[in-house]
Amino acid sequence: MANNSSRVILITGASSGIGWATALRAGRTGAKLALVARRQEKLDELADKLRSEFRTDCLVIPTDLRRPEQAEECVLAAHRHFGRLDVLVNNAGVLIEEPFDMAAPGVVRDLVETNFWAVYHTTRTAVPLMEKQGEGHIINIGSVAGRRGIPYMALYCASKFALTGFTESLRLELEHKNIFLTLISPGGVETPMPYSVDRSKIPLGNATHRKGIPPEEVADAILRAVDKKPAEVFLPAYSKLAAVLTNTLPSLTDVIVRKVRLGRFFRWT
């Protein structure tokens, strides 16, 4: 793969949170960046910062990833501009926290289109380009919620479970093409996304937001993954326990999740 000074990295959801932090970390290494999100003004602000602080060669690509043709075009645009694409970071995502039967169908559709279908379209477009250049790396930002179901996050969990299966399958399917896949699975991350949720719709237990890890911690893990190409990274590392317990002791894990999420150990009536 290209070295840091010539490596081309496309980051979706670059306008805030993990994507913003990852762009700054990558810009510091000398990578060339394609910045993708809906909010052009935020992308322009980030690009100006990258150019002034690190002299980063970056391309702003305003994109609505919910639209398949735009999701595909952002990958093609980056490849046309830089002549290659070394790393695709599928980071864009949305969150729903409410009883599944209260979520409006249009909101659910937006969630699935952003959290899963956009990844499908960017990946489907990137793979032939990476195959032709002889190598590539796709990093998908999943979640611990893609390994363990959480009450009142059924729809979000479903989208992240889909992303987990997609990533694991493609990791095996594409390895002979020298295309690597990494799943980054954080727990809570301190980004604007959880603060956009109306938790008054959660009827039981403690519905307050629990502060997560800094997005810079996830960004550092992404940049390490670019070099080391691990199959999966859990953040914090101990959050892997949720996946292990779910697979081995699901009933016990239900008790723990019920306590943490709802503030009670036993089933409610």
Image (cartoon, rainbow, N blue to C red):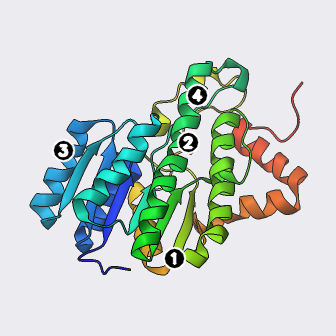
Residue that mark 3 sits on? 44
Residue that mark 1 sits on? 229
Residue that mark 4 sits on? 109
Relative image position of residue 103 (x, y in whole percent)? 64, 21
Circle 3 sits in a helix, a strand or a loop, which is it? helix
Residue that mark 2 sits on? 117
Q: Earlier in the sequence, mark 2 or mark 1?
A: 2
Question: Which quadrant holds the C terminus?
Answer: top right
Q: Residues within 10 Å of mark 2 (few under 14, many from 20)?
A: many
Q: Residue at x 24, y 63 (%)?
A: 82
Q: Amino acid at mark 2?
A: Trp
Q: Nearer the viewer, residue 103 or 68?
A: 68
Q: Residue at x 78, y 41 (%)?
A: 258
Q: Residues within 10 Å of mark 4 (few under 14, many from 20)?
A: few
Distance between mark 2 and mark 1 Cα atoms: 24 Å
Q: Residues within 10 Å of mark 1 (few under 14, many from 20)?
A: some
Q: Is residue 58 above or below residue 28?
A: above
Circle 4 sits in a helix, a strand or a loop, which is it? helix
Q: Amino acid at mark 1?
A: Lys
* Residue 261 seen anywhere in this rendered image of the structure: yes
Q: Earlier in the sequence, mark 3 or mark 1?
A: 3
Distance between mark 2 and mark 3 Cα atoms: 26 Å
